[in-house]
Image (tube, rainbow, N blue to C red):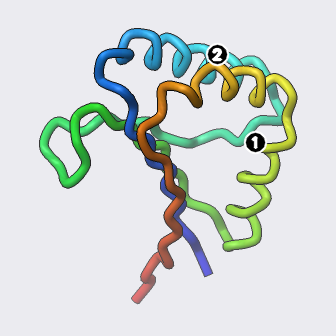
Amino acid sequence: MKVYMRMLWQFDITEEARFMELEKQFVELESRRPDYPKGGVRMQPISAGMPCNSITWEKQFDSLEEAYATVQFFRGDDEHEKLCELQRPLFKDFRIEFYKVLEF
């Protein structure tokens, strides 16, 4: 079963510049490291259910296990964790959602 995973962050709007600078560093890390998951997409709402001071990282996986493995990879990577430590104080909310991809 294919699964779509979404990671959603809402950040302190007064810290948007700092939050986005750290996001750029995550992108650079992902690009530089061949072991990082590829194909994820980052988006910021213009008009949506989430406020504009949010971002979403989304990617489709071949299974729920593969999606979970990606979450564990991020949690277990030292470089990723160092950036997270800098970014977490800017969070207002964070969640991960999983969707079954319907293939009729």
Q: Is residue 45 above or below residue 65?
A: above
* Residue that appears at 58% across and 42% down: 39
- Mark 1 vs mark 2: which is more N-terminal? 2
Q: In this view of the protein, which residue sits in the foreground, 53 or 29?
A: 53
Q: Amino acid at mark 2?
A: Glu
Q: Amino acid at mark 1?
A: Phe
x, y (%) of residue 98? Answer: 53, 69
* Residue that appears at 64% across and 15% down: 28
Q: Is residue 55 above or below residue 67?
A: above
Q: Quadrant of residue 45?
A: top left
The answer to the question of whether label 1 and label 2 lie on touching residues, with beta carbons closer than 8 A, is no
x, y (%) of residue 22? Answer: 55, 16
Q: Is residue 86 above or below residue 103?
A: above
Q: Is residue 103 above or below residue 91?
A: below
Residue 43's disc is none
Q: Quadrant of residue 89?
A: top right
The local crowd at label 2, few if under 14, some if 14 to 19, many if 20 or more residues have their Cα within 10 Å, is: few
Mark 2, secondary structure of its residue: helix
Mark 1, secondary structure of its residue: helix
x, y (%) of residue 62? Answer: 66, 68
| Residue reaching furthest to the bottom | 104
**In this figure, which residue is indicated by the disc labeled 2?**
28
**In this figure, which residue is indicated by the disc labeled 1?**
74
* Residue that appears at 81% across and 29% down: 34
* Residue that appears at 61% across and 14% down: 25
x, y (%) of residue 73? Answer: 81, 46
Q: Can you say which quadrant of the picture contains the N terminus?
A: bottom right
Callout in the foreground (1, 2):
1
The local crowd at label 1, few if under 14, some if 14 to 19, many if 20 or more residues have their Cα within 10 Å, is: some
Mark 1 → mark 2, Cα distance in angstroms: 15 Å
Q: Can you say which quadrant of the picture contains the C terminus?
A: bottom left
Q: Is residue 1 left or right of residue 94?
A: right
